[in-house]
């Protein structure tokens, strides 16, 4: 049986690792620059009849159009950088 101190040490370690992992999701360091990301609740502007499900892929083309792959119909949606829907 594990002692309470061993469990507390393990829980503390996991909490620290989780906190550091979450910080990495929010910040990406490139050289001396730091990029910060925030959620824009108004992006994208999608018609109400398009459902959302899991989104396993996102990519950007040379014209800065954003391609979003979802697990629903239509599977591929293309948006402009301002969030407006170009096509499905």
Image (spheres, rainbow, N blue to C red):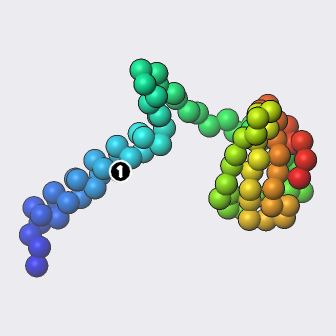
Residue reaching furthest top? 32
Residue indicated by mark 1: 18
Who is closer to the viewer here, 13 or 57?
57
Tell whether 49 sits left or right of 16. Answer: right
Residue 25 in view (yes/no): yes
Residue 50's spot in the image, x, y percent?
86, 56
The quadrant holding residue 74 is: bottom right
Comparing 54 with 88, the one in front is 88
Element on which disc 1 rests: helix
Taking depth in this image into account, of 8 and 68 the one nearest to the observer is 68
Residue 86 left/right relative to 76 = right
Foreground residue, 51 or 75?
Answer: 75
Q: Residues within 10 Å of mark 1 (few under 14, many from 20)?
A: few
The structure residue drawn at horizontal position 51% and vertical position 27%, both measured from the top left corner, is 35
In the figure, is residue 2 to the left or right of 60? left
Residue in the picture at 83% in, 46% down: 78
């Amino acid at each position: 049986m594990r002692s309470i101190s061993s469990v507390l040490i393990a829980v503390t370690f996991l909490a620290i690792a989780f906190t550091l992992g979450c910080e990495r999701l929010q910040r990406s360091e490139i050289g001396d620059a730091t990029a910060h990301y925030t959620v824009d609740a108004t992006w994208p502007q999608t018609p109400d009849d398009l459902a959302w499900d899991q989104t396993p892929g996102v990519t950007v083309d040379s014209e800065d159009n954003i391609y979003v792959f979802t697990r629903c119909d239509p599977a591929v949606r293309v948006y402009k950088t301002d969030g407006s829907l170009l096509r499905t």
